[in-house]
Each structure stands twice: as structure tokens, then as C-alpha cells.
Image (cartoon, grey):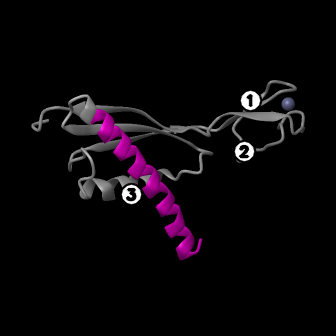
Amino acid sequence: MKRNEKGAFLMHEMSLMFEIIHLVSEDAAVRGFTKVKKIDVIVGDLSNVLPDALELAFFYLRKEKMGLLDEKSQLHIIREEAKSRCLKCLYEFVPDYRIALCPKCDLPSCVLISGETFRTESYEGSDNFEN
Ligand SMILES: [Zn+2]
């Protein structure tokens, strides 16, 4: 991987993380929270989001005290495994790519049933500066 490609990846995760923190903080403020303690994010293995880069982006934005984050706020990444199902024989398997041949019948008759998810699952807010 070339240096500028890595940078482009990080920019992608940085803007995703920026958006998540922005939306979560906005929602938390409306609910009367003064702090966001933890954000749970689901990242599918075929979602085109790199968990390491997402974490790095979170650490950076936390350091910048973005939104309602403070130095103790946590990011929890829940990995979602990729899974395909063959529509012919109903065999389920872990594919390397979005499009895969069925390992049983060798047909391109498979659909991805999980692994593309990227979303904020939940967050924990606090209205107390002590915890
Ligand atoms: Zn099959």
C-alpha cells in the first residue's frame, strides 16, 4: 500500500467517525446528557471500513474533545462477520468478497446475508461529570 492510499483510507474513517460523534453528541445533548461515555459501532467485515483506522480517528477526535467526548470516552467496535448463502442449495459460508461462488455447487448463486453493516448501535450518556 502506498503512503497516499493509507492517508485516503484514514480520511474515510475520519469523516465517518466525525459524523458519528457529531450525531451522537447532538442526540445526547437533546436528552440532557453532558457527556458521551461510550459509543458502540457495528463494523461488517465487508463494509469497507477499517476498524483500526476508525479507532485511530476516534482517539484523535477524543483528544480534540469533540462534541460531548472527554478523555475517558470509549469506542466499542462490534465486528460483524461476512456470510453468504447459496440460493440453490442454501449452504452458508464465509466469503472473502461480496461476490462469491458457492463452495458446494460452484454456482454464482449466492447472496451476502451479513458483513456489509456499518452503523452506530447505541451509546451511553452521562449527566454527571464524576463518572
Ligand atoms: Zn450452493
Q: For this view, does 5 lie left or right of residue 38? A: right
- CA gap between label 3 and label 2 equals 26 Å
Amino acid bearing label 3: Leu
Q: What mark, if any, has residue 56 been given in the picture? A: 3
Q: Nearer the viewer, residue 35 or 29?
A: 29
Q: What mark, if any, has residue 121 been given in the picture? A: none
- CA gap between label 1 and label 2 equals 14 Å
Q: Earlier in the sequence, mark 1 or mark 3?
A: 3
**Residue 37 appears at what percent x and percent y?**
25, 38
**Residue 12 appears at what percent x and percent y?**
51, 58
Q: Earlier in the sequence, mark 1 or mark 2?
A: 1
The quadrant of the rendering that contains the C terminus is top left
The residue carrying pointer 2 sits among few (fewer than 14), some (14 to 19) or many (20 or more) residues within 10 Å by Cα, namely some
Q: For this view, does 17 lie left or right of residue 60? A: right
Q: Earlier in the sequence, mark 3 or mark 2?
A: 3
Q: For this view, does 126 lie left or right of residue 116? A: left
Asked whether residue 34 is drawn in magenta, I would say no
Residue drawn 83% across and 37% down?
Answer: 102
Q: Classify mark 3: helix, strand or loop.
A: helix
Residue drawn 48% across and 50% down?
Answer: 51
Q: Residue furthest bottom?
A: 3
- Residue that label 1 marks: 92
Asked whether residue 11 is drawn in magenta, I would say yes
Foreground: disc 1 or disc 3? 3
Q: In the rendered structure, which segment of residues is drawn in magenta?
A: 1-28
Residue drawn 18% across and 37% down?
Answer: 34
Looking at the image, do the residues carrying marks 1 and 2 touch, with CB atoms under 8 Å apart?
Answer: no
